[in-house]
Image (cartoon, grey):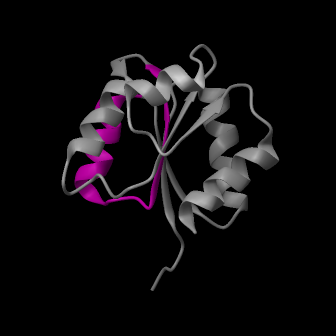
Amino acid sequence: MNDKKMVYVVEDDGDISEMIVLLLSNADLEVSASATLSDFRELLDSQLPDLIVMDVMLPDGNGMDECRELKESSSLKHIPLLLMSAHAQSHLVISECPADGFIAKPFDIYDFIDRVKLQLA
């Protein structure tokens, strides 16, 4: 039986996504990455993650809108969600959606891992 925590990463920048997947895998976590909200929703249909890390600006939608929908869903609202953005300010994002945290890009990799682990504790 696999006891690793599952993290879904929704990030359309391939380099950033690849780096996050590597960081989280090295932290002994299972990771699935999606570049679009539609791919992310397919993942959600197959398995629920222990944490979602989502970019705000995605090619097929807005991470803040998706966050709001997830947090309004009785079956999904318990899943911690960290939003990321290079453009938005944290207080604006948090006021728009009930994310469990905000990560400004570019980010410090050690701080990123610490914040992920805090959500999974």
Say left or right for 107 vs 39: right
In this view, 35 is above or below 51: above
In this view, 14 is above or below 23: above
* Res. 95 image quadrant: top left
Percent of width and height locating residue 15: 67, 28
* Res. 64 image quadrant: top left
Q: Residue furthest bottom?
A: 1
In this view, 107 is above or below 111: above
Report the quarter where the N terminus lies.
bottom left
In this view, 120 is above or below 44: below
Percent of width and height locating residue 110: 81, 49
Query: Residue drawn 78% across and 43% down?
Result: 109
Along the viewing direction, whichever of 29 and 82 lies nearer the viewer: 82
Percent of width and height locating residue 12: 51, 25
Percent of width and height locating residue 27: 71, 62
The reply to whether the magenta stretch includes residue 33 is no
Query: Residue drawn 25% across and 36% down?
Result: 69
Q: Which residues are magenta?
A: 36-57
**Is residue 23 among the parts visible in the rendering?**
no
**Is residue 33 among the parts visible in the rendering?**
yes
Say left or right for 18 vs 8: right
